[in-house]
Amino acid sequence: MSSTASQADSEHQGRYLQLIIGVVCMVMIANLQYGWSYFVDPMSKTQGWSRAAIGGAFAFFVLAETWLVPIEGWFVDKFGPRIVVTLGGILVALAWSLNSIATSIPMLYAGAVIGGVGAGAVYGTCVGNALKWFVGRRGMADLDTLAAELGVSQSTVRRDVEFLQHAGLVERTHGGVIWVGEKTASGARPYAFDQRMSYHVDVKKQIARAAHIESVFGETSDVALHDHQILGAVA
């Protein structure tokens, strides 16, 4: 059991490395979306395609990138993030190759769909993986950024933020908003993850020492401990 606890601590400490790798992966596939406009005019002049026809490729890319994320998330849960990100990278490379030799609109659309699937696999997996590792971090967002990301007006964002503030889920800041989480049944705010790690440490260790390991953990028994810090002390 001690080896299991040590492995869990090692994986927890490596979350920042996974975050950095995830950011690098997303940067590597970002040019398919954020650099698209730079290629519209050159493609139109070289191939004689209309801007509307070229824009259709971007529409197919966005649809494939976003609508398939739930399915890609299922694959992540079943096979793990490493395989999904690797396959997504292969699809992105294939899309780059196909786009570089595209001589017709159907070929361009095919590359857009393939690239969208690959980019969605990489992006969705990296973001989801980071969220799982940093569940205790409170989120902060700028109102202007929210309006741009959601494609709505700032007045709409402000109304939604006010609604969330009245519900007690967020706190308003100057030009931004901070997520504070839901209240417990008693009406108190739950402690953040990092705070809970250092809260009542001695009491948790006493609980662990008081546990009768031989009688509690049998070969065929299943035991669930809510606090993983107690589990670490027991181990």
Image (cartoon, rainbow, N blue to C red):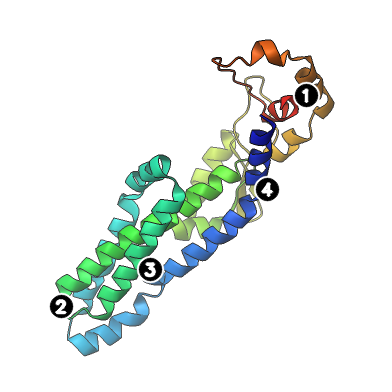
Specify the quadrant that holds the N terminus: top right
As measured in the structure, the alpha-carbon distance from the residue carrying label 2 to the one carrying label 1 is 66 Å
Q: Which amino acid does label 3 sit on?
A: Gln
Residue drawn at 55 percent across, 17 percent down: 222
Q: Mark 2 points at which residue?
A: 104
Secondary structure found at label 4: helix
Q: Can residue 58 be seen in this view?
A: yes
How packed is label 1: few (under 14 Cα within 10 Å), some, or many (20 or more)?
some
Residue 145 vertical position relative to residue 193 in the rendered view, above or below = below
* Residue 229 coordinates in the image, percent (x, y): 71, 30
How packed is label 4: few (under 14 Cα within 10 Å), some, or many (20 or more)?
few
Q: Is residue 151 visible?
A: no
Instruction: Classify residue 137 as left or right of residue 94.
Output: right
As measured in the structure, the alpha-carbon distance from the residue carrying label 3 to the one carrying label 1 is 49 Å
Q: Which of 90 and 137 is in front in this view?
A: 90
The disc placed on residue 33 is 3
Q: Mark 1 points at which residue?
A: 204
